[in-house]
Amino acid sequence: MNLDIGAVRVSLGGTPILRDATLTAEPGDFVGLVGPNGSGKTTLLRTVYRALRPDSGVVRVGGEDVWSLSPRAAARRTAAVLQSRNTPGGVTVAEVVALGRTAHHGLFSSGEDRSAVRDALKQAGVADMADRAFGSLSGGERQRVLLACALAQRPRVLVLDEPTNHLDIRARFELMDLVRGTGITVLAVLHDLDIAARYCDRLVVLHQGVVTAAGPVLNVLTPGTLREVFGVNAAAELCGDGVVRVVYHAAPLA
Ligand SMILES: Nc1ncnc2c1ncn2[C@@H]1O[C@H](COP(=O)(O)OP(=O)(O)OP(=O)(O)O)[C@@H](O)[C@H]1O
């Protein structure tokens, strides 16, 4: 399903945070949202999963304005993987993943709900820890469980907020491989530009609430953008193995 964000403006506490943010993801696209701290990335994600209504502009998922859909209908289309700090620790992994079905079932869960949970546990590689307390898991394991919860939702669009935060390098690759392998349309906030360059079809750069660059990785992570937006002397380079890597040439600019 495609995702279209058109000229979204958001002010919080009287301060403009997003100014005419525009972004498109085609079905199956993996789009990375990058930018410095405080540039508005999380705020933009919140407008996509219908947690925040823009002051103006539109967010369409599958061609429909998310605010013309009921909260349940919007949640059936879009799942979000957020930072894990607010998830209660006492519940089991299976119970956390089952929360992903909330938008689908009525008072009682169905056979389809149970099979969606089973499939998601398996897909995220956490089936063997289904009965463990969520609070007893490591950061990397928790992140996979939260991804399983989102997959159980059987969404058409997946938004992720810094999914590789706190993960070691191998766990980062595993999680990103897993997300990429779902084939779902993805919009992911990523701080690690190397990971973003490696996995994303396209990048969107937010700077002070404005989209300053968008497109294929090599077109976006230019020395000029990296200097002006991120304050580093660096460039994205296509290496012999076909992987785009960000090469940092010197310490952060003064
Ligand atoms: N409720 C609020 N009231 C006022 N300002 C807010 C509110 N929520 C967020 N902000 C501000 O909006 C700006 C953008 O925040 P946001 O979390 O979207 O940035 P971000 O790009 O995701 O940052 P980071 O990379 O640090 O996570 C920040 O300056 C933040 O302080």
Image (spheres, rainbow, N blue to C red):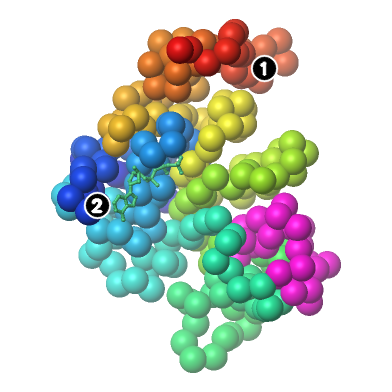
Mark 1 burial class by Cα count in 10 Å: few <14, some 14-19, many 20+:
few
Q: Main secondary structure of the magenta part?
A: helix
One can see residue 135 in this view: yes
Q: Position of residue 136 (x, y in %)?
A: 77, 68
Q: Amino acid at mark 1?
A: Gly
Q: Nearer the viewer, residue 207 or 212?
A: 207
Query: Which residue appears at 70% of the width and 44% of the height?
Result: 167
One can see residue 222 in this view: no
Read off the magenta span. 123-149
Horizontal arrangement in the rendering, residue 174 relative to residue 15 (left or right): right
For disc 2, the marked residue is: 12
Horizontal arrangement in the rendering, residue 13 relative to residue 207 (left or right): left
Residue 193, which numbered label? Answer: none
Q: Position of residue 174 (x, y in %)?
A: 73, 43
Residue 242, which numbered label? Answer: 1
As helix, strand or loop, the secondary structure at mark 2 comes to strand
* Image mark count: 2
Q: Amino acid at mark 2?
A: Leu
Q: Nearer the viewer, residue 162 or 102?
A: 162
Quadrant in the rendering for residue 177: top right
Instruction: Work out whether mark 2 precedes mark 1 in sequence or the reverse, and give the earlier one.
Output: 2
Vertical position of residue 73 compared to residue 40: above or below = below
Quadrant in the rendering for residue 212: top left
Query: Which residue appears at 21% of the width and 43% of the height?
Result: 16
As helix, strand or loop, the secondary structure at mark 1 comes to loop
Q: Look at the image and tell me in which quarter the C terminus lies.
A: top left
